[in-house]
Amino acid sequence: MFERITDTARRAVWFARYDASLHGTPEIQPASLLPGIMEVDKNLIVALLPAGADGYARLWADAQALFAKPLQAVPPDTDLPLSRQTRRVLAWADDKAARRPDPRIEPRHLLWGLLHEGGPLAACLNAHGITLETVDAGFPPTACQPDPGFRWSGFRRWIAGRLRPLTKLLVPHD
């Protein structure tokens, strides 16, 4: 999975690690991932916020308020592991990206994973108007999604007509 993460998404995870060290958490929590995404892809967040750039500062403050009272900062050279929840967020992002024509994981996929994981961070994003649906709307349509106007009944009849002669050839007759 990590070989498919874009440089921008890697920077978001790096900033999440930095944010976690500032708050003194022993692991990189999903709450640290949102400020990381906001740091590296401000245009994405502003585009998704109904209030636009005006809501950016409020979202930043609300995301920082999700942390408990700051503990002693962790030294920058200390390795911080990903928490179980953050690994699930990355797995959701990986799954979402794998279903796309371009399987690279971008900050939008990380944001989608945060929303899909749920919890107080997703509630904070939803309160600001960023939902799974708004993030999904920014993804280009995949090649595997059927056209809504496609007539399956006609297609099934066409396939059945083409396969009937083949099945007579393949099925052994006694």
Image (tube, rainbow, N blue to C red):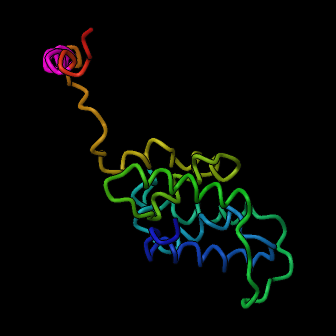
Residue 3 within the magenta-colored segment of the rendering: no
Q: In which image quadrant can residue 75 be found?
A: bottom right
Q: Residue at x 50, y 49 (%)?
A: 130
- Bounds of the magenta span? 154-166
Q: In which image quadrant can residue 44 be found?
A: bottom left
What x and y, as percent, mark residue 7? 44, 77
Instruction: Choose between 102 and 7: the one closer to the eye.
Output: 102
Q: Is residue 14 above or below residue 116?
A: below
Instruction: Choose between 142 and 169: the one closer to the eye.
Output: 169
Q: Residue at x 63, y 73 (%)?
A: 16
What x and y, as percent, mark residue 85? 70, 56
Q: Residue at x 60, y 69 (%)?
A: 35
What x and y, as percent, mark residue 13? 58, 73
142 left or right of 166?
right
Instruction: Choose between 41 and 116: the one closer to the eye.
Output: 116
Q: Is residue 128 above or below residue 145?
A: below
22 left or right of 52?
right
Q: Quadrant of the C terminus?
A: top left
Please, what is the dominant secondary structure of the magenta stretch?
helix
What x and y, as percent, mark residue 135? 44, 49
